[in-house]
Image: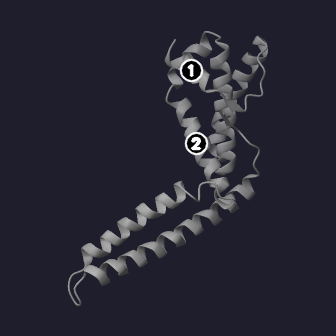
Amino acid sequence: MFEIKPCDPQTYRQQTRRSTLIVAVIFVALTMLLSSLAVMLFGEPGGDNFRFNVAGVLAGVVLTVMLVRGPFWSQAWLAPAVYGWQLKRNLMRVTNVMHQVKEQVQANDPAAMKLLRFYHLGLTQMHELDANSSAQAQLVREMDEHQTRMQALGIKLEQSRLDPAWLQALKNP
C-alpha cells in the first residue's frame, strides 16, 4: 500500500538533483571503464573500435540500471528519487482507470470517491515537488468540487493511502 508522505519541495529537489548527479557520475565512469576495457581486450590498435565502444556504453547502461534498481534502491541518498518514482507510478495506475473512476464517482461509489481524492492529493504533491504550479492551478476547481461532494456524503477527506482494493474493485465490478 503506497502512502503519500509529507515532503519539503525545496529539499526534495535538492536531494534528487544530488542523487541524479551521483548516478550520472557512476554511469559515466562505468561506460568509460567498460568501453576502454572492451577496446583494450578486443580492439585493434589504430583500427575501427566503434562497436567495442558502443558495447561498453550499453554494458554501462545495463550495469547502472542494475545498481540503481538493486543495491542503491534502498540507500538513503536515493530515497527521495525512489519516493518520487513510486508516487508517479501509483498516480499512473489511477490514471489508467480514470474513466472508470469518474463513472463510479458519478454513481457516488465511496471507494471511487476515495481513490479520486488520493489521486488529487498525490497529483498536488507531485506538482509541488516538481515546481509545476501552472498544472496545479488547473486542478483546483475539480478538487474543490470533489471535496465538497465527499463532505456531503460524509466521506473522510484525508486519503493519503492508495488501497489496491480500490483499483481492483474498478477492474472487476
Residue 123 visible in the shown view: yes
Quadrant occupied by the N terminus = top right
According to the image, label 1 marks what residue?
Answer: 101
- Neighbor class of circle 1 (other Cα within 10 Å; few <14, some 14-19, many 20+) is many
The residue under the point 36% across, 81% down is 36
- Is residue 137 visible in the rendered image? The answer is no
Return the residue nearer the eye: 39 or 48: 39
**Disc 1/disc 2 C-alpha distance (Å):** 18 Å
Write the residue at 68% across / 27% down. 117
Mark 1 and mark 2 lie on one chain; the one further toward the N terminus is: 2
Q: Amino acid at mark 1?
A: Val
Q: Closest to the observer: 141 or 56?
A: 56
- Image-based side of 9 in relation to 172, left or right: right
Q: Specify few, some or many for label 2: CA neighbours under 10 Å numbering under 14, 14-19, or 20 or more.
A: some
Quadrant in which residue 125 is drawn: top right
Identify the residue at image location x=37%, y=66%.
59
Helix, strand, or loop for circle 2? Answer: helix
Read off the residue under disc 2. 88
The image quadrant that residue 76 belongs to is bottom right
Q: Is residue 20 above or below residue 153?
A: below
Picture layout, residue 114 above or below residue 82: above
Residue at the image point whose x is 37% and y is 69% from the top? 57
* Image position of 61 with respect to 100: above or below: below
Question: Going by the picture, which residue comes out furthest to the top?
Answer: 107
Check disc 2 and give the amino acid type.
Lys
Q: Position of residue 131 (x, y in %)?
A: 66, 51
